[in-house]
Each structure stands twice: as structure tokens, then as C-alpha cells.
Image: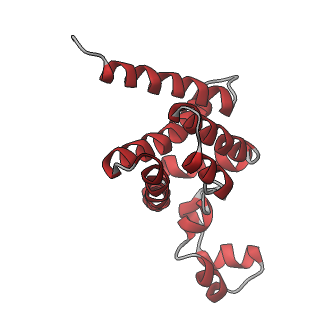
Amino acid sequence: MQNGLESLTTDEIAAASGVSTRTFFNYYPNKEAAAIGHPPEFSESDKEALRTGTAPLAADIKRLLGRHIETLAKDEAILRMVGKILRCNEKARGILDGFLSAQREDLTEVFCSRIGNRQTAAALAHSATNAIGGAIFLWEHEDGITLSQALDRVWEGLMDASRLLSSTGE
């Protein structure tokens, strides 16, 4: 990995992992998928808490996002490495987009069970996954900020944008 993902072959990755190339392909379709791995899912208990929550929706969403950021923060070194790969590898970005699309669909179902309107649920799911991505981006590019602090700043921006969209008379 020191010379970049492009310089590695799947044979080299498999050998370094102690598996055959054939076994490697049983788990990963390509080296990019192996390099970025599978991003952590939102936990079932957190999704259930959002689905059945009685607090204001914004508070329950923020709690879900905060818990997810806590999970991501446990592997900051991996998160930084994946970010580096994503910045320079279009194929890896496409793979991540596929994972995020599946997460958005999953969250859409969670939101839909709570609010009923599928289009609104999809918009909320999209905003939630974008907030996580925005927090990671801010954390990567601003010195001295934690993932949690980055999420707080992204969340403030999202809430400000929501207020602007819901205000009348402008």
C-alpha cells in the first residue's frame, strides 16, 4: 500500500493476507473493495430507537448520527486510510457510493415507518448519510477537530438550512 493501490495486484494482496487469489475473490470482487472494506452499518438498536422514538425527530436523528460517529471514531486510522484511497481512486469511490446507497435505502425504510411519507423519508435518509460524510470530510481537513465536533458543526449547518427552507416571506 506504500506505493498506492494502483501498484498492487490482487495476487500480492492475497499473498500478504495468507490466502489464495481464488479465496480473495470469494470475499471481494476487486482490490478496491478490499481496500475500503464495508463501512459500518447503523446499528439495529439505534435504528429501532429512531423508528420508535418519541423525542422530536431532529433529536432522534442527531442521536443516531452521534452514535454512528462514535463507531467510526473507534477506527480513525482506518478512516484516514480509506479517505486517502477514496481521494485518488475513482473505482473505490464508486464502490463506497454503492454501500452508501444501500444505507440510504435502509434508513429510508426506518424513517418511513416513523413518518409515513416515503419522499420525505428518502430526503431525511440522504441528509443523514451526507451529514456523516460531511463530518468525516471536515474532520479530515481541519486540524484539531474530533469526529464528534465535526458532526456537531455539520448538524448546525443542516439545521440552519432546514430553518431557511421552512421560513416564509423571503
Q: Judge left or right: residue 130 versus residue 78.
A: left
In the image, farthest residue toward the top: 169
Camera sees residue 84: no
Instruction: Pick the residue in front: 113 or 102.
Output: 113
Q: Judge left or right: residue 78 versus residue 127.
A: right
The image quarter in which residue 143 lies: top right
Could you say where residue 48 lies in the image, as x and y percent from the top left? 61, 53
Could you say where residue 156 lies in the image, as x and y percent from the top left? 52, 22
Could you say where residue 105 lies in the image, as x and y percent from the top left? 43, 58
Could you say where residue 132 lies in the image, as x and y percent from the top left? 55, 40
Q: Quadrant of the C terminus?
A: top left
Instruction: Pick the residue in front: 94 or 21.
Output: 94
Q: Is residue 96 above or below residue 59?
A: below
- All told, the count of numbered labels is 0
Q: Judge left or right: residue 167 versus residue 80.
A: left
Q: Is residue 13 above or below residue 101?
A: below
Q: Quadrant of the N terminus?
A: bottom right
Which residue is at a point 43% across and 56% down the rendered structure image? 90
How are the colours assigned in the image?
secondary structure
